[in-house]
Amino acid sequence: MTHPPETAFQSIETIKALQHKKLKELLSYLGTNSPFYRDWFAQQHIDISAIRTIEDLAAISPVEKEHLQERNDDFLCVPHTKIIEYTSTSGTLGSPVTIALTENDLQRLALNEYVSFTCADGVPTDIYQLMLTLDRQFMAGMAYYAGIRKLGAGMIRVGPGVPSLQWETIARLKPTAIVGVPSFILKLIHYAKEHAIDVNNSSVKKAVCIGENIRNTDFSANVLGRKINEAWNIQLYSTYASTEMQTAFTECSVGKGGHHNPDLVIIELLDENNQIVKPGSPGEVTITTLGVEGMPLLRYKTGDICITHHEPCACGRNSLRLSPVIGRKKQMIKFKGTTLFAPALFELLNGMEEIKDYVVEVSSNEIGTDEVLLHLLPVENNEAIDHKIRAYLQAKLRVTPYIKYLSAEAIQKIQFPEGGRKPFKFIDKRAVIIKT
């Protein structure tokens, strides 16, 4: 099976020219087929023929998640008879959104993940153990499956959770790589330690990490990444994606950010005034999908705050690279005068030996300010451990959140509510959602 070389290896000029060509095709397609965007262009008096470059996009106001939630069906550009697959967002922030895919979109998704796995040094002789759900309208699981098939590699669909089953399958079928959530990989390590399994003597040599950061913004390993590699000498590859963009940013072995696939998406980082941020500055990831037939998006604000890096990578790719997610705009917490993003709080909790697992819950108090409740699974439930946890949080945050100690079963119930497909580490119960 042969495929053309990635566009990311071509010159920056060639990449930009390709994106401008695809952008013009998209604008024409939306103007003809999208009820939402026809209205959007009309409201703003946009002449789409005047939009020729990525810089010209500034003339069009960005679209937000609320638009997609309120007018979901109006984003559809094809008859329902052309829809092959209905997927949905997880609903982590607000009600879920349906993303409908045609046969062409499914092929595009497979190409995206094929490129992602090859970027993460995947080869046809690999065998991937998928530690994630492939049902419940979860686009990512289906995408990984399709991409690995296109790569020609082997696949084991074990599903999420159950460390005992994961290790039994590893011992029996000898996968070379795993795809899973980093915090679950840590649980695999803990299980192995408790059951005298030598992780470094297993067949697994690499892990494609989904859903959680394993690096800081300077690309050094964060607590989660360090804990995994201190125990298990495997190559870790970080990824970033969303259902709406139907595209992934995946690290190569250099580990300096998720590589942009310029064939499939245009990316802008915007400030609070919807202006492009300066290079090296954090901004909200705003995407324009390329080649999507069913529900293409133009200037869609994801809510994720990242930094882009534009210098060529040592791997030879010239497309931009995306930093780990610094935070989500709607997950920003203002607690007793201290501003926190959820990933920074996760990093603190992951670094505490006294805590085995956690869920962060944010709510509004009677005067409208944020309250933070930490649901914690301690290594032991005693006064000494409680004192250590509170002292550590006070030292690091300068404020102490409310703490509630729970059993492993209770934590599991909160993390995986009925119908959930990935662990919830952050629960937002605020009546008013704060925007930066």
Image: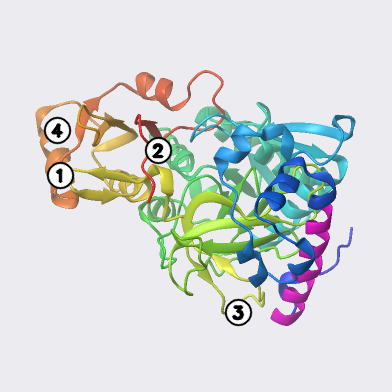
Name the residue that disc number 3 marks. 312
Pick the front one: 7 or 19: 19
> Taking 386 as reference, is 315 left or right?
right
Residue 147 horizontal/vertical position (percent): 76, 48
Amino acid type assigned to the residue bearing label 3 in the image: Pro
Nearest to viewer (mark 3 / mark 4): 3
Decide if residue 177 is on the left or right side of residue 163: right
Query: Is 256 placed above or below 338 here?
Result: below
Task: From the image, tell me which residue sits under label 2.
Answer: 190
SS of the residue at dot 2? helix
Taking 288 as reference, is 310 left or right? left
Distance from Cα at disc 1 to Cα at disc 2: 30 Å
Gap between marks 4 and 1, in whole Å? 15 Å
Which one is closest to the eye, mark 4 or mark 1? 1
- Res. 313 in view: yes
- Kindly state the secondary structure of the residue where label 3 is placed: loop
Residue at the (60%, 70%) spot, across then down: 320
For the residue marked with disc 1, what is the amino acid?
Val
Query: Tag 4: residue type?
Result: Asp
Q: Which mark is residue 399?
A: 1
Q: Position of residue 138 (x, y in %)?
A: 65, 33
Of residues 341 and 164, the one drawn nearer to the viewer in this rendering:
341
Camera-side mark, 2 or 3: 3
Q: What element does badge 4 sit on?
A: helix
Residue contact between numbered discs 2 and 3, judged by CB atoms under 8 Å: no
Whichever of labels 1 and 3 marks the residue nearer the N terminus, that label is 3
Task: Relative to 267, say whether 159 is above or below.
Answer: above
